[in-house]
Image (tube, helix red, strand yellow):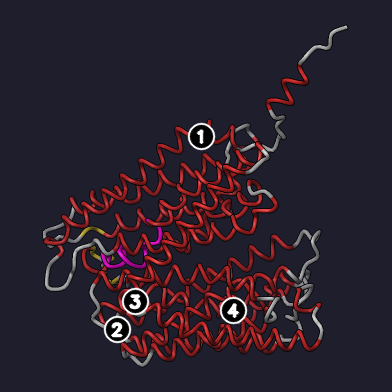
């Protein structure tokens, strides 16, 4: 009865929304399950089942994140140009199903094959669901924002279920059953998309303007790209260190290009905005590099050096990720309401302040972990409350920096550079994943040792990372007045024009 009541309430909620919105909400839930399982389990599976070393496993996790975020940008280009968004979404989900099924076999060879299939699929199809949703609305439709909020909620429901189920199977290390669950979840997303196939048709995309012959040729090219990427990703996954260096080199080239474009840009106001973007991007890189240690370094710390017993219940490591999920779902609306009230009372809350605050919160989140280690019991295991507080602080920091990231690009990027600056923002997240893998690779090897023996290594690493985030956060606090001067909507008059305008004509 409760299930029927829930479905009826959802129908009432979405009844005023355009056709397809409800379907996309449920598709989002099921399409997220596979990623949630892999994201929260990859390092544990690699170390405990495949017996890879900590360094190899955390490097692989870093490359996993870099590919996932990097391919989002490429998927956004393919969707609507070579394949319709619904075709690319279903094709990507099919690759994820194959990938999870391969990983479920439990062999190292098929693990890399499955990871290549999964990453290609998840990397390319994530942007498709957002494109299908936005196409349900006209540009002036005020309901779009609410639909995206609900879709984001659906994604978090998927994460919550995925993390919870992953923790359940982790208790017995039933990894094969876990990846079969992920396979079935992704397959349900395909079924839902097929049942709503006509509803989810593309609208106003470049592909629809092509002739029938051009349409077929582009479709064939799109399918070729989708399938051809799998062996490329597989090859690069076999060489994670070289791939990491390659991606970092690409990111460095993009950064230098942006710096050059900024210096050479003729409009002074836009140049100042671009300068502010570059400074804030450096700050965000520090934040996301520590944030993305959650499924790697912090996960291993939780498993080996934290007392996960809460009364008679043992907290499974994947369940810890749900601290973030709950904080985001509950804290987002609360923080939005708080900021609205504060601004109504005259408080100035802007982009530089929020970025600085997020880094300071991340610093505290890491600096309290050595305190927990110092207060550990005789077995060397820290109380769970320290890790809980760390995740809560990180989640609040995420709420401060994540929602304004893309909005910041719309505000600061000149029209001709919006594409490259949006792409660079996504690359920052991928690069941060690599740095998170590097940091996680510095943790002590837990095999054949004890929490007491590895605690000093963890305490030193967490203190250094916390101090680094604190330094960057303090630097941004100091730069707030400077950044506020850079970020402006007012057009500036070049000095030579101003001088000419102030010359008093002689009578």
Q: Quadrant of the N terminus?
A: bottom right
Q: Residue 348 location, x and y as percent?
A: 59, 34
Q: Disc 3 or disc 2, which is closer to the eye?
A: 3
Circle 1 packing at 10 Å, graded few (<14), some (14-19), many (20+), is: some
The relative height of residue 420 versus residue 316 in the rendered view (above or below) is: above
Q: Seen in the image, is 175 located left or right of residue 117?
A: left
User: Residue extending furthest right?
Assistant: 507
Q: Secondary structure at mark 1?
A: helix
* Disc 4/disc 3 C-alpha distance (Å): 50 Å
Q: Quadrant of the C terminus?
A: top right
The residue carrying mark 1 is 480
Q: Seen in the image, is 112 located left or right of residue 348?
A: left
User: Residue extending furthest bottom?
Assistant: 105
* Disc 1/disc 4 C-alpha distance (Å): 51 Å
Residue 2 marker: 4
| Residues at marks 3 and 2 touching, judged by CB atoms closer than 8 Å | no
Q: Quadrant of residue 190?
A: bottom right
Q: Residue 496 location, x and y as percent?
A: 70, 25
Q: Earlier in the sequence, mark 4 or mark 2?
A: 4
The residue carrying mark 3 is 239
Circle 2 packing at 10 Å, graded few (<14), some (14-19), many (20+), is: some
């Amino acid at each position: 009865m409760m299930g029927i009541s829930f479905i009826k309430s959802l129908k009432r909620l979405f009844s005023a929304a355009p056709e397809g919105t409800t379907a996309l909400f449920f598709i989002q839930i099921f399409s997220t399950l596979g990623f949630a399982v892999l994201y929260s389990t990859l390092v544990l599976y690699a170390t405990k089942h495949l017996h890879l070393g900590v360094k190899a496993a955390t490097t692989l996790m870093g490359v996993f994140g870099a590919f996932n975020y990097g391919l989002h940008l490429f998927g956004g280009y393919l969707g609507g140009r070579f394949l319709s968004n619904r075709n690319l979404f279903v094709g990507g989900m099919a690759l994820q199903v194959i990938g999870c099924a391969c990983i479920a076999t439990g062999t190292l060879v098929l693990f890399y094959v499955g990871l290549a299939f999964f990453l290609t699929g998840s990397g390319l199809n994530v942007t498709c669901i957002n494109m299908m949703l936005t196409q349900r609305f006209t540009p002036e439709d005020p309901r779009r924002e609410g639909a995206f909020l609900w879709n984001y909620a659906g994604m978090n429901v998927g994460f919550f279920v995925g993390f919870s189920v992953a923790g359940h199977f982790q208790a017995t290390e039933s990894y094969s059953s876990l990846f079969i669950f992920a396979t079935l979840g992704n397959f349900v997303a395909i079924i839902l998309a097929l049942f709503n196939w006509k509803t989810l048709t593309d609208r106003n995309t470049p592909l629809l303007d092509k002739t029938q012959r051009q349409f077929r040729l582009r479709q064939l090219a799109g399918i070729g790209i989708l399938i051809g990427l799998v062996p490329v990703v597989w090859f690069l996954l076999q060489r994670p260190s070289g791939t990491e260096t390659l991606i970092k080199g690409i990111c460095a080239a993009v950064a230098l290009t942006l710096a050059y474009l900024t210096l050479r840009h003729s409009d002074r106001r836009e140049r100042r905005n671009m300068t502010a973007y570059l400074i804030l991007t450096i700050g965000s890189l520090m934040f996301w590099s520590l944030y993305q240690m959650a499924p790697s370094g912090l996960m291993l710390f939780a498993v080996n050096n934290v007392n996960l017993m809460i009364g008679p219940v043992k907290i499974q490591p994947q369940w810890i990720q749900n601290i973030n999920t709950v904080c985001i779902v509950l804290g987002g609306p609360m923080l939005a309401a708080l900021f609205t009230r504060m601004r109504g009372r005259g408080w100035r809350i802007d982009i530089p302040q929020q970025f600085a605050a997020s880094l300071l919160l991340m610093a505290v989140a890491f600096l309290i972990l050595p305190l927990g280690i110092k207060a550990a019991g005789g077995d060397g295991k820290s109380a769970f409350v320290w890790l809980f507080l760390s995740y809560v602080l990180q989640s609040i920091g995420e709420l401060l920096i994540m929602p304004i990231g893309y909005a910041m690009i719309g505000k600061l990027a000149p029209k001709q550079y919006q594409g490259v600056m949006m792409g660079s923002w996504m690359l920052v997240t991928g690069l941060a994943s690599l740095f998170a893998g590097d940091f996680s690779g510095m943790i002590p090897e837990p095999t054949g040792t004890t929490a007491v023996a590895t605690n000093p290594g963890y305490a030193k690493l967490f203190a250094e990372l916390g101090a680094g985030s604190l330094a960057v956060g303090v630097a941004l606090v100091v730069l707030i007045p400077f950044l506020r001067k850079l970020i402006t909507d007012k057009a500036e008059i070049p000095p030579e024009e101003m001088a000419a305008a102030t010359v008093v004509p002689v009578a």
